[in-house]
Amino acid sequence: MCSSDLLYYSLTRKPKLEEKGAKYTELHDLIKASDIVSLHTPKNLKIFSAQEFALIPKGAIFVNTTLGKAFDEQEFLDWLGKGDNLVIMDYSVSPDFYKQFKDLNNVIFSEQIAGRTTESKQRMSMKVVKNLEANTP
């Protein structure tokens, strides 16, 4: 069961989430109201700009699990350098991108890449098998 304080934004509404208590809200309202902002977007879909970073409340946690850059690199680095911002992410973008801030105390890296877990590899393998079976005469 989701907490009544769980808000989400998506390009499409998620009725099953809402049945469990999650509340849909517009992106900017969601960012302003969040203690934790967590991105889960398709590869290289840029969703955050300086405007969105400016809306994140001081002391909030920013989690990036996207496969690629969901934000402008310099705008992210500018935001990261302000205040008590905390970032948690994996190494899914590129090693060169992370070299810029890997030694900062307010950045936590996971060595596990969100989209490359054992489970996700197994699911992808099963999809390939099913596709092959479906297309075999």
Image: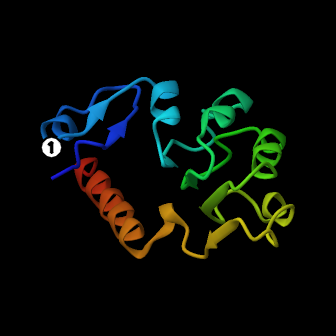
**Left or right: 24, with 71 as reference point:** left
Which amino acid type is marked by label 1?
A: Lys
Query: In which image quadrant can residue 10 be found?
Result: top left
Q: Secondary structure at mark 1?
A: loop
Please determine whether, in this image, residue 5 is positioned above or below residue 14. Answer: below
Q: Position of residue 94 (x, y in %)?
A: 75, 60
Q: Residues within 10 Å of mark 1 (few under 14, many from 20)?
A: few
Q: Position of residue 97 (x, y in %)?
A: 81, 57
- Residue found at x 65% / y 49%: 68
Q: Could you say which quadrant of the image residue 49 lies in? A: top right
Residue 137, compared with residue 115, is above or below; it is above
Q: Is 90 positioned to the left or the right of 122 in the image?
A: right
Q: Nearer the viewer, residue 115 or 39?
A: 39
Q: Which residue bears the numbered disc 1? A: 20
The percent coordinates of residue 39 (x first, y second) are: 52, 46
Residue at (36%, 71%) from the top-left corner?
119
Scheme of image coloration: rainbow
Q: Is residue 128 above or below residue 20?
A: below
> Residue at the spot x=63%, y=46% of the render?
58
**Looking at the image, which is closer to me, 35 or 90?**
35
Q: How many marks?
A: 1
Report which quarter residue 79 is drawn in.
top right
User: Whole-percent x and y of residue 6?
Assistant: 31, 43
Q: Is residue 118 above or below residue 8?
A: below
